[in-house]
Image (cartoon, grey):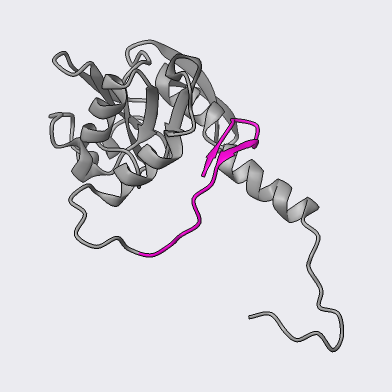
Amino acid sequence: MLTSYNGYPFNIIPYQGAEEKCKEPLSQRVVKTLLSVVKNSKFHRIYMDNFFTSHRLMVRLQQKRFCATGTVRDNGMAKFPLISLKSLAKTERGTSDALFDKANKIAAVRWNDNRVVSLLTNFEVTKVLSKVQRRVKGGRKDVDAPFCVTSYNKYKNGVVLFDSHMENYFTSIKEKSGTGHFS
């Protein structure tokens, strides 16, 4: 689903089953199809979760001039020799590591919060830190977070908001008696 940050739907793809003999990964096909409705990429920023994000997809979006940021699974970070998840998890909360792929203009960042979060971005800064509040025993604490992490957290929830709106406002379809049934 492609939505605005406040839950307005732009494009929805109902699941239709697997495609036969397609070399392109499912995640890339889905993103490509969803973004096909976008007329001018310079007016949009794409935020996605780790199912969709990969270095290869970020390069492709960069080439099509889409600004994109997404969380990424550890196996999608192979091109970036960042501090390992285990090592970063042992550091103080708020510790981060970032690298930039100059050839493709893709940045990678790992940040230690409650757990380690990894992101790829093709437009946001990773070295600039902002302060975020986190709960700790006895109160709250300011923790450093890379700007791309705070931006991702701010704009990632469009699909969740859409689902919430649908749940709140969807009217159920009821069968009239004697007309059959739905399956």
Q: Is residue 96 above or below residue 3?
A: above
Taking depth in this image into account, of 114 and 69 the one nearest to the observer is 69
Residue in the image at 78% along x and 52% along y:
168
Taking depth in this image into account, of 129 and 78 the one nearest to the observer is 78
Q: Residue furthest front?
A: 179
Q: Is residue 91 above or below residue 175?
A: above
Taking depth in this image into account, of 107 and 103 the one nearest to the observer is 103
Q: Where on the picture, by quarter, is residue 72?
A: top left
Q: Is residue 101 left or right of residue 94?
A: left
Q: Residue furthest top?
A: 128
Q: Is residue 33 left or right of residue 150?
A: left
Place of residue 171 in the rendered image (x, y in percent of width and height, measured from the top left):
81, 60
Residue in the image at 59% along x and 31% along y:
4
Asked if residue 9 is among those painted magenta in the image, a careful observer would answer: yes
Taking depth in this image into account, of 109 and 170 the one nearest to the observer is 170
Place of residue 62 in the rendered image (x, y in percent of width and height, measured from the top left):
29, 21
Identify the image quadrant of the C terminus. Answer: bottom right
Asked if residue 169 is among those painted magenta in the image, a careful observer would answer: no
Residue 146 visible in the snapshot: no
Please state the extent of the stretch shown in magenta in the rendering.
1-17
Q: Is residue 171 above or below residue 100?
A: below
